[in-house]
Image: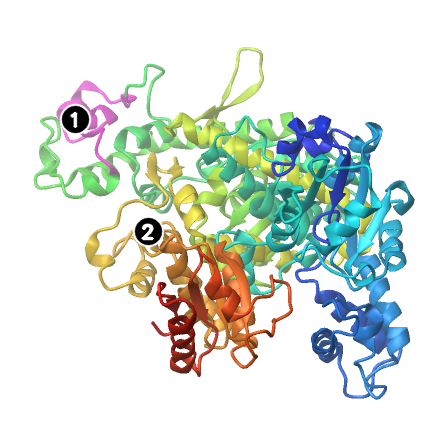
């Protein structure tokens, strides 16, 4: 079993594996005070958005009869958000901060029992939060070195309320030297006021001896800098435009929210030894492939438990990753289940599954596609040990007459079977072949009785070796198999079943596949016990179709540095060994795959940590949620995914050797009419346009086509993409700081888009306010006069879809009065 290193918050070295915390290592010795943000830094949540806490509270309130009739949990979530906005507008403390009590005071008695629902919200926080083991590790590390630690949070909770959440999640609040919150201490971090309070609480410590860590640039970086305090930006939770989890939310909404943050945390632990390209594959393994495979492994082990099986047998080559994953998963769950991989492939079971060989079976073999005549003779056992074609036992008289043997095709051995249809066969010893194609002559040769006998002997031999290999690998229970495969049509499973039946071998086999097409349902009618994680003619078949249409990179990422099984041979010691195909992948691809596997194993470790903390939350995840994570990557890849995954080589050894990039070059004629036309044409099959992965190829040529397509649907074809393009233009122009001119929903959406694009919003200006009026919020408050007075930032984004011309004129008029030497740069949604 592979070694498993558990993730624990008490490991004082764990923080050094976090890519965002590694820079601290060289600064620790100069510290006297560590200041740590709380939410999204020390505490993570098992939900997609902080407001999801309100939804959970609303559900519990509804169940307890604390919401008015007609107020659903979803309605309560909206009311709770609105109540907070109203409370902030009232500014009851006179410093831009509010308490939880101020928020619930905005909810009328006719809506809910405010005091009791407030407690349910705190309970929801305790249930949904968990301790970030990296940050807890760093805090313990500092405390061992007698470095003071303070928790500093912009929050409407009181220190006691915050402490209750920390304590419920295994963090003793009495271990830190101070807990400061903006709602009690008279100001937030963005203004610098909360950092003033921090320095006052530790009078003997200078600003230069303090290090602050947090996830918000404006509050935790700029706010700290305003007081000469060093800071580390900790962006594990915030998402950017490049984040696969952001694209996931655009495509599918909230997917498996319980593991959303742990996927990000696992991604942040990429080893230093990896290069930049390898780090991408690590992150993909940790955030995308790992979660899907973990859900699949848990499903497999659930079936093992229910069926009383103690061994599971994944098929190679995918078992290179699935095997150790299953071993780790079983160990984490404390299950005594053995994992024994089987070297089985479509080609290795093709002959073994046949009960006889004649014209029907021959046509099946000839339909394999790119197989050459040389490979065909080898497959059928018509070659000698030296690799030359076997000479059929013809008499000299037959050789001079019309009989054909394998050596008659020596000149055509490099032809593929399809190519042989278009070449005229010319053989001196076969005068009757006048005008006959090589294909027709080949078929006539292979159907001669003595040749058929040789093939039937090969079939019996390979079937015996296949079953021998299974018994060899499955010591103890060869008659009770649970096979595991990534899946699709169930071809290998049906062939294996047929081989066992033809040999009259007793067996009680369960076949498990991650993904099944509707074809797998037909095998049920033939007596196979074949079960699918998704698809198989059952639930979530629409997802399974996308997996089966473009399986290339998923399959390749799971494989190691060895080829597929071609056949079996008995060695001198009597053991049966698989004969493996040679690989043609470049060495760099193997390094990328191994990096991906490291990411997958990292997700497993962090998932196990979270499962120990929040078993009830993770117990609700099902096949659909796990599958949507990988489905998004196939159906709507990010530009980085399309570039990295599309560059992998997909090698198929079934019926010949085919090795091509998953996203190869496409003739311009198929792209000039746009991405939508290209994707449509890709579905007509390889004779029209041979494309392994249409969505990946389309994204390589038009990076945001699919993003825009699904974003418009998610936004009910509203104005979201207009605002996306505004910020995208700014990013492409290299602009990193802007002012928003306008308030309300459009401004809120622009703030979100700015964060995704890595653009800082310096301030939000209310056009209706007087010059001295400041817009309070999570950004540095600023008026138009103050903005105009700045020396290095005169960029404004119009935050309106209605008053664009009016707002532009107002800005230009004010600049004419205040800064005639400057021309403001104005960006609007429709420009």
From what the image shows, is residue 603 above or below residue 812? above
Q: Which residues are magenta?
A: 389-416
| Residues marked 1 and 2 touching at CB (< 8 Å) | no
Question: Which residue occupies 42% across, 28% down?
Answer: 588
| Tag of residue 691 | 2
Direction from residue 193 to residue 360 in the image, left or right = left
Q: Using the numbered discs, state the Cα–Cα distance from disc 1 to disc 2 in whole angstroms.
A: 33 Å
* Residue density around tag 2, few if under 14, some if 14–19, many if 20 or more, within 10 Å: many
Which type of secondary structure does the marked residue at label 1 adopt? helix
Mark 1 vs mark 2: give the one in front: 2
- Which residue carries the number 1 mark? 411
Q: Position of residue 561 (x, y in %)?
A: 48, 27
Label 2 sits on a secondary structure element that is: loop
Left or right: 14 in relation to 377: right
Q: Residues within 10 Å of mark 1 (few under 14, many from 20)?
A: few
Residue 512 appears in the rendering = no
Horizontal relation, residue 766 to residue 371: left or right: right
Closer to the camera in the image, 496 or 657: 657
In the rendered image, residue 529, in percent from the top left (x then y), is placed at 64, 51
- In front of the other: 752 or 217: 217
Residue under the image location 22 percent in, 23 percent down: 407
Residue 413 among magenta residues: yes
Residue at 80%, 51% (x, y): give it: 614
Please tell me which residue lies in front, 133 or 763.
Answer: 763
Magenta stretch: residue 740 in it? Answer: no
């Amino acid at each position: 079993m592979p070694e498993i290193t558990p993730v624990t918050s008490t490991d004082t070295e764990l923080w050094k594996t976090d890519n965002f915390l590694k820079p601290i290592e060289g600064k620790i010795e100069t510290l006297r005070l560590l200041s740590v943000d709380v939410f999204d830094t020390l505490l993570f949540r098992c939900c997609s958005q902080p407001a999801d806490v309100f939804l959970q509270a609303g559900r519990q309130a509804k169940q307890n009869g604390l919401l008015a009739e007609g107020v659903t949990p979803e309605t309560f979530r909206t009311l709770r958000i609105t109540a907070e906005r109203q409370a902030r507008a009232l500014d009851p403390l006179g410093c831009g901060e509010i308490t939880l009590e101020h928020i619930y005071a905005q909810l009328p008695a006719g809506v809910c029992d405010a005091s009791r629902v407030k407690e349910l919200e705190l309970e929801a926080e305790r249930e949904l939060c968990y301790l970030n083991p990296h940050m807890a590790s760093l805090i313990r590390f500092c405390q061992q070195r007698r470095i003071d630690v303070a928790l500093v949070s912009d929050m409407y909770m009181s220190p006691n309320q915050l402490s209750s959440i920390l304590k419920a999640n295994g963090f003793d609040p009495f271990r830190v030297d101070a807990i400061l919150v903006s709602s009690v201490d008279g100001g937030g971090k963005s203004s610098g006021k909360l950092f003033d309070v921090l320095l006052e609480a530790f009078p003997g410590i200078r600003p230069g001896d303090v290090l602050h860590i947090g996830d918000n640039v404006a509050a935790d970086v700029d706010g700290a800098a305003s007081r000469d305090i060093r800071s580390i930006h900790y962006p594990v939770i915030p998402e950017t435009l490049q984040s696969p989890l952001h694209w996931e939310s655009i495509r599918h909404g909230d997917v498996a929210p319980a593991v959303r943050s742990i996927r990000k945390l696992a991604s942040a632990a990429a080893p230093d030894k990896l290069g930049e390209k390898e780090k991408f594959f690590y992150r993909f393994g940790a955030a995308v492939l790992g979660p899907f495979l973990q859900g699949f492994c848990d499903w497999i082990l659930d079936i093992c438990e229910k069926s009383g099986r103690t061994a599971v047998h994944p098929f190679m080559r995918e078992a290179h990753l699935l095997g150790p994953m299953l071993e780790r998963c079983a160990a984490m769950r404390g299950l005594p289940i053995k994992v024994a991989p089987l070297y089985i492939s479509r080609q290795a079971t093709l002959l073994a599954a046949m009960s006889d060989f004649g014209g029907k079976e021959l046509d099946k073999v000839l339909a394999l596609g790119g197989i050459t005549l040389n490979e065909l003779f080898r497959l059928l056992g018509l070659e000698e040990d030296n690799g030359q074609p076997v000479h059929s036992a013809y008499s000299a008289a037959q050789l001079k007459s019309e009989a054909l043997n394998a050596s008659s095709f020596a000149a055509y051995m490099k032809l593929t079977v399809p190519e042989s249809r278009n070449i005229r066969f010319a053989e001196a010893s076969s005068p009757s072949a006048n005008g006959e194609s090589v294909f027709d002559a080949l078929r006539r040769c292979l159907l001669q009785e003595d040749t058929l006998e040789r093939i039937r002997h090969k079939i019996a031999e390979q079937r015996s070796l296949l079953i021998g290999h299974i018994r060899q690998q499955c010591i103890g229970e060869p008659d009770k198999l649970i096979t595991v495969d990534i899946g699709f049509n169930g071809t290998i499973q049906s062939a294996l079943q047929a081989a066992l039946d033809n040999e009259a071998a007793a067996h009680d086999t369960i076949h498990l596949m991650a993904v099944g097409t509707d074809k797998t349902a037909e095998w049920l009618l033939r007596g196979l016990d074949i079960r699918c994680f998704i698809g198989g003619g059952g639930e979530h078949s629409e997802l399974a179709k996308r997996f089966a249409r473009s399986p290339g990179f998923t399959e390749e990422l799971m494989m190691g540095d060895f080829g597929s099984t071609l056949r079996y041979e008995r060695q001198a010691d009597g053991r049966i060994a698989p004969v493996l195909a040679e690989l043609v992948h470049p060495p760099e691809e193997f390094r990328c795959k191994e990096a991906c596997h490291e990411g997958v194993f990292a997700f497993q470790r962090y998932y196990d940590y979270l499962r120990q903390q929040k078993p009830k939350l993770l117990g609700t995840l099902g096949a659909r949620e796990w599958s949507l994570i990988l489905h998004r990557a196939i159906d709507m890849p990010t530009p980085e995914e399309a570039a990295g995954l599309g560059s992998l080589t997909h090698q198929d050894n079934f019926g010949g050797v085919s090795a091509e990039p998953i996203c190869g070059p496409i003739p311009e004629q198929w792209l000039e009419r746009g991405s939508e036309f290209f994707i449509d044409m890709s579905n007509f099959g390889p004779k029209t346009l041979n494309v392994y992965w249409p969505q990946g190829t389309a994204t390589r040529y038009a990076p945001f086509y699919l993003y825009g397509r699904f974003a418009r649907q998610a936004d009910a074809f509203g104005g979201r993409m207009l605002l996306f393009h505004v910020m995208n233009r700014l990013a492409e122009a290299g602009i990193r700081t802007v002012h928003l001119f306008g308030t309300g929903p459009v401004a809120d959406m622009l703030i979100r888009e700015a964060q995704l694009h890595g653009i800082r919003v310096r301030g939000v200006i209310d056009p209706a306010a007087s010059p001295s009026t400041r817009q309070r919020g999570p950004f540095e408050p600023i008026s138009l006069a103050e903005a105009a007075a700045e020396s290095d930032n005169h960029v404004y984004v119009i935050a309106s879809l209605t008053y664009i011309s009016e707002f532009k004129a107002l800005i230009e008029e004010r600049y004419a009065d205040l800064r005639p030497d400057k021309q403001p740069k104005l960006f609007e949604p429709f420009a």
